[in-house]
Image (cartoon, rainbow, N blue to C red):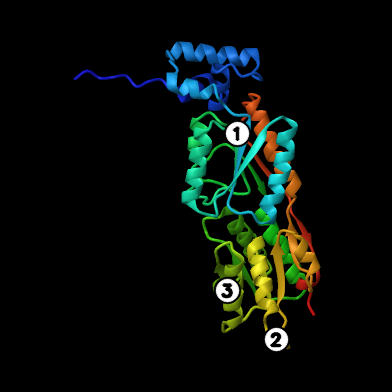
Amino acid sequence: MTSVAARVTIRDVASAAGVSVATVSRVLNGHPGVGPGLAKRVQKAAQSLGYVPDPAGRALRRQVADMWNVIVPDFHAFFTAVIDTVEGVAMEQGIAVLVSNTRASLEYERRYIAAASAHRAAGAIVAVVSEHESDVSPLLEGGAPVVLLDRRVDSFKGDTVLLDNHLAGRLVAEHLLGQGFRNMACITGPAAVSATEERLQGFADALATAGRPLDPAHIVHADLEPAAGRQAMRSLLAGPNPPEAVYADAVSLTLGSFQALAERPVGSPPVALAGQDDDLWTELVRPAVTVVRQPVADLGKVAASQLLARMAGDDAPASLKVLPPELVVRESSLRV
């Protein structure tokens, strides 16, 4: 049987030239923004490997849209604010933005990523559903630069922009300890979501350092929906050892937790609440809610700027940018 040599791929050329797949794609398809020295290196690697573009694929690559895909797991306040910032940066560069809401579904996420790849998106910013199961490789294989936002993915080695989530949890724990609370709990998201898991870890680490380890029975994992947060708070309050202070480490869980506390009968024992992400309602309700505020505009600008740099041929090593949170103290977490 005659063996057939494997076709040289764009990834092979990128590896030989020591650049990203996106840069090879831009050079081979005549896009501007790649320096002449770098372009020559890519062309030499392609020639030495005998790279032959796939005709159908090349036809598609010539139709790269001046559009970014932004893929997020929900449209809660945090992500809508980030999207607004990203759109502002993109529009200044003449780039349109297509937003997709995966509704925290891996199946929806796969469909949206496949669609973005098929439509030759110029780049993508993705907040994934799962740290372990999400896969952005179809975008990378199509030559589009990708920036992950808010959450990590185990298999992804590219640019990522995050909040310092461990610090967020630690700030809440230290504040509650300073108020004299000792019996505390945390309502957190699914274990697959790196952001909430890191906040839980920061919260637990700070309590352990203070000699007040977090009771495993006081850790409740919930879907990132207000109804789930509400039920989680109800279950904690109905347990044999109700907490006197609770950290709800996602914005949807904060809302649900506040609702559960508000529905209790008059005269119920007070329970302090600290949440995640500032929103209009957190300041307007009574008691106003203590929250960890994220630098939303900075997160969006950093992600968008990194995407622009990659589109222009920046081949610096993959970056991990971690931004600091701010604790905003209000009445909900103060000892009565």
Q: Residue at x 48, y 44 (%)?
A: 111
Q: Describe the element under mark 3 as helix, strand or loop.
A: helix
Q: x, y (%) of residue 85?
A: 73, 43
Q: Residue at x 69, y 86 (%)?
A: 265
**Horizontally, is 320 left or right of 51 in the view?**
right
**Disc 3 and disc 1 in contact, CB within 8 angstroms:** no
Q: Which residue is mark 3?
A: 231
Q: Amino acid at mark 3?
A: Gln
Looking at the image, residue 310 lies above or below residue 80 = above
Q: x, y (%) of residue 247?
A: 67, 68
**In the rendered image, which quarter is residue 181 located in?**
bottom right
Which sits in the foreground, 336 or 148?
148
**Horizontally, is 297 left or right of 20 in the view?**
right
The label number, if any, that marks residue 76 in the structure image:
none
Quarter of the N terminus within the rendering:
top left
Q: Which residue is mark 2?
A: 268
Number of labels in the image equals 3
Q: Which residue is mark 1?
A: 123
Looking at the image, residue 252 lies above or below residue 101 = below
**Horizontally, is 270 left or right of 256 in the view?**
right
Which sits in the foreground, 145 or 113?
113
Q: x, y (%) of residue 84?
A: 72, 45
Q: x, y (%) of residue 231?
A: 58, 74
**Separation (CA) of disc 1 from disc 2:** 52 Å
